Image (cartoon, coloured by chain):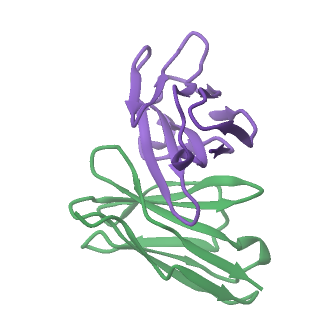
Amino acid sequence: GNSVTQMEGPVTLSEEAFLTINCTYTATGYPSLFWYVQYPGEGLQLLLKATKADDKGSNKGFEATYRKETTSFHLEKGSVQVSDSAVYFCALSDLSGGYNKLIFGAGTRLAVHP
Amino acid sequence: KAGVTQTPRYLIKTRGQQVTLSCSPISGHRSVSWYQQTPGQGLQFLFEYFSETQRNKGNFPGRFSGRQFSNSRSEMNVSTLELGDSALYLCASSREGDQYFGPGTRLLVL
């Protein structure tokens, strides 16, 4: 079945460091891919998305490229801030269940220190 | 534009009881999906409602049910609560694909 695998956390970085959070997926067909962020005590916020191969999603300095050949959608940011500390979830739309059925990775906790 | 709202935000129940959670979607959104988030299982899809009809369902027992009203508000119900039902329950609404999540209802079963 469809699945998403993320690198385990926590990821601990100093402010202004480069961030990469790895995400790979297994899916039939061509799902859309998403990154969501969850701040403490809150729900999920859509960070960025890509709907087809080679698309690059970007938002708030974060980027991820839909790589079909490596089935990956790694999240990157050139210079992280303390305010980026949160849990990040990679997800795909399960086409067998329709666009609104999301399958999530386990989440990666990011801690950024001043 | 108001976001997705969920009530109540926190709930404590005992085993065997039942519980009803409510979700009000963003105005104009007709699809509402529900997810369960636990430390052990992560985020898992429960079901989706669109125009008052259940359109998709995840792999949860029949104790978990839901419904949607004509104004798109949705409720989910869990009967005969078990300790393992303790979780954050998130709902998300969408109109053209992108899902917007509410803050969740944290349920603790004692």
Question: Can you tell which quarter of the image residue B2 is in?
Answer: bottom left
Q: Which chain is green?
A: B
Q: Which residue lies most toward the front here?
A: A114
The image shows residue A30 at horizontal and vertical percentages of: 47, 23
Question: Can you tell which quarter of the image residue A53 is in?
Answer: top left
The image shows residue B35 at horizontal and vertical percentages of: 55, 59
Q: Determine whether, in the image, residue B42 is placed left or right of residue B70.
A: right
The image shows residue B89 at horizontal and vertical percentages of: 57, 67
Q: Determine whether, in the image, residue A94 is placed left or right of residue B95.
A: right
Quadrant the N terminus of chain A occupies: top right
Q: Nearer the viewer, residue B87 or A30?
A: B87
Q: Is residue B75 above or below residue A34?
A: below
Q: Which chain is purple?
A: A
The image shows residue A75 at horizontal and vertical percentages of: 55, 29
Q: Determine whether, in the image, residue B79 is placed left or right of residue A98.
A: right
Q: Is residue B84 above or below residue A105?
A: below
Q: Residue at x 66, y 87 (%)?
A: B12
Q: Residue at x 36, y 63 (%)?
A: B53
Q: Is residue A1 visible?
A: no
Q: Residue at x 68, y 90 (%)?
A: B17
Q: Nearer the viewer, residue B84 or A29?
A: B84
Q: Residue at x 51, y 59 (%)?
A: B47
Quadrant the C terminus of chain A occupies: top right
Q: Nearer the viewer, residue A30 or A61?
A: A61
Q: Determine whether, in the image, residue A27 is placed left or right of residue A109.
A: left
